[in-house]
Image: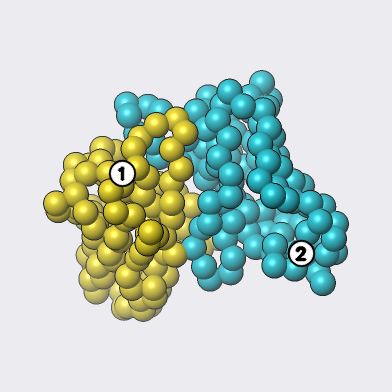
Amino acid sequence: SQQGEEDPQALSIQEGENATMNCSYKTSINNLQWYRQNSGRGLVHLILIRSNEREKHSGRLRVTLDTSKKSSSLLITASRAADTASYFCATTTLNTNAGKSTFGDGTTLTVKP
Amino acid sequence: EAGVTQFPSHSVIEKGQTVTLRCDPISGHDNLYWYRRVMGKEIKFLLHFVKESKQDESGMPNNRFLAERTGGTYSTLKVQPAELEDSGVYFCASSHKTGSAETQYFGPGTRLLVL
């Protein structure tokens, strides 16, 4: 299986509800990032969390990181129809000074108005 | 500050033809990355430039793909000859420096369709 697997693959909720997406990875990381991709658009960076951090907030977004379980979660509170998009986690490991990101398959979130 | 830009936004070509994708990173960013998402699959790393040098090209699928970054500014990714399985979205990203907390900023992607 892949480094950076998101769970669930698809999530459908009503506007105003909270959405939680999970990401698991296999190797040691230096940081983990969450991205959003709206249909037909590019990747938008949401949050970066370092391996020595456990939780970060940005507006309605809350990201947690549990390095012992090699997992992260993205919580979107009070969801809006505009949050409908695909969400990806990406891990970065420093190996020979290369900072490439390894992505999961993504979670497709649909927020119904 | 302008973000990462990519050109073209879409490209439709026939099998066997050549296509060249261009990426302009954020000004001053030494690191430039190419990724691609083939239909229905995850986003995969292709290669990483530090300035004009290829730091890591372990993700390049085969020798039909050639990436360059002459002068350490913009980069091109050429596919020659294109095959059907090359269809997908090609993303470029840049970051200021390589580090454990360095955000990679992505461009909008180039959607390539090989018929």
Question: How much space separates mark 2 and mark 1, taking CA atoms?
Answer: 34 Å
Q: Which amino acid does label 2 sit on?
A: Arg
The extreme front residue here reads B1
Question: Which secondary structure lies at badge 1?
Answer: strand
Q: Name the residue under label 1.
A: B31
Residue under the image location 74 percent in, 46 percent down = A75
Closer to the camera in the image, A102 or A41? A41
Closer to the camera in the image, B86 or A64? A64
- Specify the quadrant that holds the N terminus of chain A: top right
Q: Is residue A69 left or right of residue B62?
A: right
Chain painted yellow: B
The extreme left residue here reads B71
Chain A: colour as depicted: cyan
Q: How many marks?
A: 2
- Specify the quadrant that holds the C terminus of chain A: bottom right
Q: Residue A80 carries which label?
A: 2
Across and down, in percent, residue B15 comes to 30, 74
Q: Which mark is residue A101?
A: none
Across and down, in percent, residue B70 comes to 14, 53
